[in-house]
Image: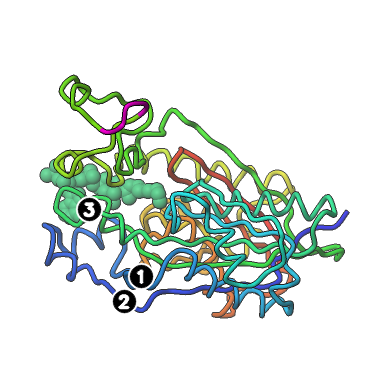
Amino acid sequence: MPKSKIAGVGMYIPEQVVTNNDLTQVMDTNDAWIQERTGIKERHYAAPYKETSTTMGVKAAAIAIERAGITAQDIDLILFATLSPDYYFPGCGVLLQRTMGMREIGAIDIRNQCSGFIYSISIADQFIKTGMYKNILVVGAEVHSFGLDFTTRGRNVTVIFGDGAGAVVLQATEKENQGILSTHLHSDGLGAELLSMMNPGFHGGIHEPDESKKQRQTNQPFGRAFMSPEEMAAYDFYPNMDGQAVFKKAVDKFPEVIMEALHTSGLKPSDINLLIPHQANLRISQFIQHKLKLRDDQVHNNIQKFGNTTAASIPIALCEAWEMGKIKEGDLVCLAAFGSGFTWGSALLRW
Ligand code: UT7
């Protein structure tokens, strides 16, 4: 049975750097608080009206495809993980397929937020193992900056997030000691609202408007009523997070799902050459490192420079670590993520 190896990695980081001090110009926050609680010094923001999750994803993908020694025509399937798609629908996968002039291959968008890249890798791995596809492009890309609350009210969320894209080409390999050993996916919907965006501009989902809103005459006779500008201002259509609850669950589930992957292959934390945790918060990464008794050189973090880029954070960190020469053939690499949903997962691979 073929296994999947990562044959090429790429990343794209938008040019504009936004430091913690820049954020103090628009909200009540400070560099010391942000660095102490999250480790973040700066993040990058996409260029408005020029860069989107798709355009950045395409740039990262082009590099990954070139490094895999193939062309866009060789890709058999696209998996695009993002919570910030260019359009509400269709997804970014088809936009990437169009931009890169690919064949009429399948294109799937994955809506799993911080664990979206791990979920995508796991899905791609299954398609390769069955022999259905040989080259699968997996992209994680996010433009958070267009949807954040840049007032003091949104500071606990806004200071964390950044924009960027990363991509890998997963390729079939028959080599004995190479490729993905296992992937592990989990969810717990009980925490769904603790890190969420519930109302992206309309009376959302199951949350009924109050009486006064119900009585309002609208031009929407059936279904939901769209919001007026006044209501837009009052409603919470920005991302919302109970940071402490998310933190607690994350430090519980990250080590658990990493150990699950190691146990599956009869390995232990000391066997890991490089752990790349989703870059949620440097304190979370440090907690995992401490819990698993890993040395500094066994964990790669870059949240200090890029912030939390959700689905893009793992492929960006993976690409950066590879470019720095931190990953060599035969190395045991572990990828792990936890985030909104809650969803979490891990992937263990031999490079
Ligand atoms: O990638 C997706 C998964 N997400 C995560 O894993 C995030 C997990 N959570 C976290 O990283 C942390 O909870 C945060 C960094 C988001 C927040 O840190 P915290 O230590 O949990 O702070 P807090 O929300 O409990 O707030 C503590 C105080 C509050 O003030 P009071 O009530 O004590 O007066 C906040 O209003 O800090 C205040 N605060 C801020 N102050 C300055 C919250 N955000 C800020 C800010 N600047 N940006």
Q: Earlier in the sequence, mark 2 or mark 1?
A: 2
**Label 3 crowding class (10 Å Cα cut-off): few <14, some 14-19, many 20+?**
many
Q: Residue at x 26, y 63 (%)?
A: 35
Q: Earlier in the sequence, mark 2 or mark 3?
A: 2
Q: Residue at x 19, y 40 (%)?
A: 228
Residue 182 in view of the camera? yes
- Distance Cα–Cα, label 2 vs label 3: 18 Å
**Label 2 crowding class (10 Å Cα cut-off): few <14, some 14-19, many 20+?**
few
Look at the numbered disc 2 and give the secondary structure of its residue. Answer: strand
Closer-to-camera residue (43/336): 43
**Which stretch appears magenta?**
219-223
Residue 49 image-quadrant placement: bottom left
- Distance Cα–Cα, label 3 vs label 1: 16 Å
Q: Are marks 2 and 1 in contact (CB under 8 Å)?
A: yes
Q: Are marks 2 and 3 in contact (CB under 8 Å)?
A: no
On the image, the x and y values in percent for residue 94 come to: 59, 59
Which residue type carries mark 1?
Ala
The stretch drawn in magenta includes residue 107? no
Is 345 rendered above or below residue 74?
Answer: above
* Residue 149: mark: 3
Relative to 327, 15 lies left or right: left
Q: Label 1: which residue?
A: 46
Look at the numbered disc 3 and give the secondary structure of its residue. Answer: loop
- Distance Cα–Cα, label 2 vs label 1: 7 Å
**Label 1 crowding class (10 Å Cα cut-off): few <14, some 14-19, many 20+?**
many
Which residue type carries mark 3?
Asp
Q: Residue at x 14, y 41 (%)?
A: 230
Q: Quadrant of the C terminus?
A: bottom right
